[in-house]
Every structure is written in structure tokens, then in C-alpha cells.
Amino acid sequence: MAHTTKGKKQLLTRVRRIKGQAEGLEKALEAETDCTAILQQIAAIRGAVNGLMVEVLEGHLRDHLGPDVTDPKQRSEDLEQIAGILRSYLK
């Protein structure tokens, strides 16, 4: 997956930010923080995960389904994989 290798530093930065947000959520729950603040933290984490998903998905689509792909069979297989992942993600 060349697209995750090229953007590795940026992707890891996003993952670490999500990890920090999840740790903050855990601490807030342990401290019995107001539920409104908890909900805001959950929404922030979800937004961060969605942003990460979009970034990786866009790179994957460009690399595996873009105009430079010459093998129609491989393209079809990649498309089916992505469709399955999206179905799972959007449940």
C-alpha cells in the first residue's frame, strides 16, 4: 500500500491524536464528567476517525482504482473489497 507508506507520518499523527482523544474520554468517564462534555468528546473522536478513514480511502481509490490501473480483473476485485469495507464502516 504505497499510499499509506507515502503519508505514513501524517497518518500516524492522526492516529496518535485519536489515541489522545480516547484517553481523554476515558479520564472524563473516570472523573464522572458531565455527560454533555462526554458526548462532545465522543463526537470529536468520531470526526477524527472519519477524517482518517477518508484520507486512507482516498489514497486507496487513487492508487488502486484510478486511471493508471490496467488490469480490469484486479480493479474489480479492489472495488468489491472497498464496497465491503464501506458497508461495514457505515453500519
Image (tube, rainbow, N blue to C red):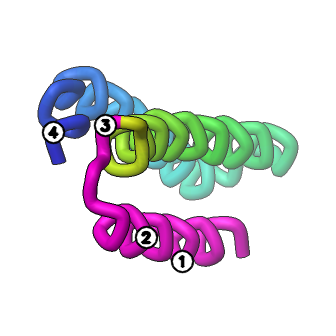
Residue for badge 4: 2
The amino acid marked with disc number 1 is Gly
Residue in view at x 86 percent, y 42 percent: 36
Q: Nearer the viewer, mark 2 or mark 4?
A: 2
3 or 4: tag closer to the N-terminus: 4
Mark 4 residue crowding within 10 angstroms, few (<14) / some (14–19) / many (20+): few
Q: How far apart are marks 1 and 3 (CA)?
A: 23 Å
* Contact? badges 4 and 1 (CB < 8 Å): no
- Residue 71, horizontal then vertical, whole percent: 27, 60
Give the quadrant of residue 63.
Answer: top left
Q: Which of 50 and 16 is in front in this view?
A: 50
The amino acid marked with disc number 2 is Ser
Q: Which numbered circle lies on residue 76? A: 2
2 or 4: tag closer to the N-terminus: 4
- Residue 73, horizontal then vertical, whole percent: 33, 72
Mark 1 residue crowding within 10 angstroms, few (<14) / some (14–19) / many (20+): few
State whether residue 24 appears in this view: no
Residue in view at x 59 percent, y 44 percent: 50
Compared with 51, 73 (above or below) is: below
